[in-house]
Amino acid sequence: MTNLTYKLNPMPEKIAPEKLERLARLETATIGHFYHFGFASPAIQPVLSGKVVAATVATLAIPGLDSTLLHHCLSSVGPGYFLAVDRLGDRKYACWGGGVTRMAAMMGLAGGCVDGPHTDTAEVVEQDFPMWSRGPSPVTTRLYDSGGGFNVPVSIGGAAVLPGYAVLADDSGVLFIAPEDLDAVIAEGEAKTERGRVNEARITGGVHLGEMSGASRMVEAKLQG
């Protein structure tokens, strides 16, 4: 349903569980070595450490003072989905607090991300809910009925995100992956993870990093030239 105030689109198709299971075994920092798209700003950090989420993205865009659509749409988002909330540039008013967290947990959401602040950190911790934001704020939104969009294109920390994207969120940050890139990203991520294990073992065995990476050879060549 669409009008000039609210734009509500259907939930996106879920990504195959086996792909998300493979994605969840990777790290955003590993993928960051070879993939350049979809990384949210480092300003968006986990509220709880040690959480890893791989899920299908549902999106929401709501204006600064208003969380009416967030309250409404939580009933439509369930297990296997990660709700990414675009605050349309606001960095002061927290739309996501204790009540939203409890509802999200009750609906079985895999996690959530706000390109803006959250509030009620203690309640997020109590619910043990995987959540990423730009940090805490005591100033909250209200129900002003001013509009917004559900499952529309959004911007999260500078990353362009469409409903139905995959997300990988961990202690290092939040990464959104277009479905057409997902197979290749997972395959390269798995290969790079295995190469990393081999290199870690070599360093533990006494090989110097500069020697292994070739950095020392580059420096020595410049010094000799």
Image (cartoon, rainbow, N blue to C red):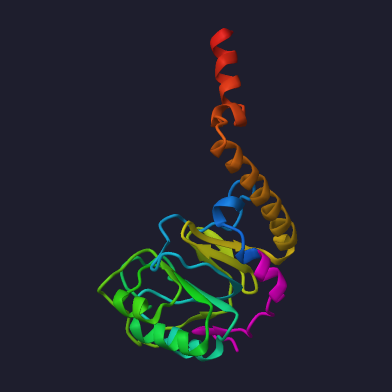
Q: Position of residue 22 (x, y in %)?
A: 67, 65
Residue for point 60% across, 14% down:
221
212 vs 129, left or right, is right
48 vs 85, left or right, is left
The residue range painted magenta reads 1-22
Task: Examine the structure image and report whether residue 176 is included in the region drawn in magenta.
Answer: no
Task: Examine the structure image and report whether residue 15 is included in the region drawn in magenta.
Answer: yes
User: Height in image: 52 above or below 14?
Assistant: above
50 vs 188, left or right, is left
Residue 78 position by quadrant: bottom right
Residue for point 46% across, 60% down:
171
Q: Position of residue 209 (x, y in %)?
A: 55, 32
Residue pushed farthest front? Answer: 205
Residue closest to the eye, 204 or 171: 204
Q: Position of residue 118 (x, y in %)?
A: 35, 72
Whether residue 59 is visible here, answered yes or no, is no
Residue closest to the eye, 23 or 89: 23
Quadrant in which the C terminus is drawn: top right
Residue pushed farthest left? Answer: 138
**Badge count:** 0
User: Height in image: 10 above or below 164?
Assistant: below
Q: Position of residue 133 (x, y in %)?
A: 40, 67
Residue for point 59% across, 51% down:
30
Quadrant in which the N terminus is drawn: bottom right
Whether residue 178 is visible here, answered yes or no, is yes
Residue 200 position by quadrant: top right
